[in-house]
Image: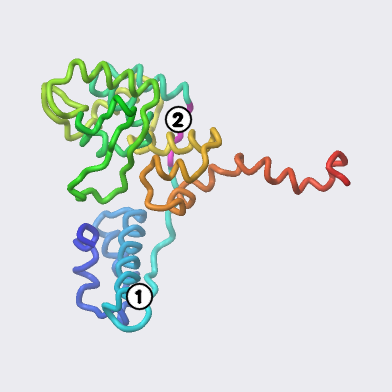
Amino acid sequence: MGFTGKAVLPHFGPYLPRDISKELCRSYAKERAEAGKKTGSIWTELGHLQSALNFGAKTRMFDGAPPHIWRPQKPQSDKRILDAGEIRKLIEAAHDPHIRLALILLTGTGARVGAILDLTWDRVDFQRGQINLRLDDATTRKGRAVVPMNASTRSALDVAYQAALSEYVIEYAGGPIKSIRKGFKNSVDRAGLGSVRIHDLRHTAAVHLLGAGVPIEKVSQILGHSNTQITYSTYARYLPEQMADAVEVLDFMNLRRAT
């Protein structure tokens, strides 16, 4: 709640858990929408409130069961999933070395852009072939993982390490970078890919892993999710193709299966 609390506490703070109603949640959603917040953000904020109240009830910070927190319907995802050819076009369209390296790492690890921009050389282990995206200060809100290098990421990192001017893997003029949005957009435009967001690269990595038959437990670890349920709820709609062999068992009209 240290982060989400900034949004929800002014509205819900004066109330006891037992006093939180559906109407109160609806009024919160209306206020946030009028403030320009998207439905997805409101849905997430109220979900964090539910988690906090569940924790409070579990640890007996208050008596009784936690109240049910009403949330608006979660908006349909508008994820853009790139195919292998589009990914190569995007990387090749990056003129600046630091943008090219960032794109290789984003697509090769499935990491969030913040984790890539935070990455320092002391967390790149060439001997073990691992990239540690975690931070020791525990200040990041999103899960991060230790991800093995593939051939492309290792090659790109090796070249960058030889020319490094700072402790940061993604650097420009010898210093860290706060954002690559402009360079990313320029690369997308030059590649002629239309509408693509940086976070779509993470979704693309996850879908390609699942499409290749990688078990969802491994995909969850690579993405840094705290449990596989998060991975499943986010990418379940991309799984039906992986279940094709399972439903073959139910093909009762196939005479070759008849016994």
Instruction: Please report the residue visible at 44 percent of the width from the left and 23 percent of the height from the top.
Output: 86
Question: Where's residue 241, x and y in %?
Answer: 61, 39
Residue 52, compared with residue 228, is above or below; it is below
Question: Where's residue 180, x and y in %?
Answer: 23, 30
Question: Where's residue 189, x and y in %?
Answer: 34, 23
Would you identify the image quadrant in which residue 45 lies? bottom left
In front: 179, or 191? 179
Asked which secondary structure carries label 1, the reply is helix
Residue at far front of view: 127
In front: 131, or 62? 131
The three-letter amino acid code for the residue at tag 1 is Glu
Q: Name the residue under label 2.
A: 82
The three-letter amino acid code for the residue at tag 2 is Leu
In the image, taking residue 255 as reference, residue 162 lies left or right, namely: left
Would you identify the image quadrant in which residue 21 lies? bottom left
Span shown in magenta: 79-83
In front: 37, or 2? 2
Instruction: Please report the residue visible at 43 percent of the width from the left and 40 percent of the height from the top.
Output: 79
Instruction: Please report the residue visible at 36 percent of the width from the left and 28 percent of the height from the top.
Output: 149
Would you identify the image quadrant in which residue 239 lies? top right
Of mark 1 and mark 2, the one earlier in the sequence is 1
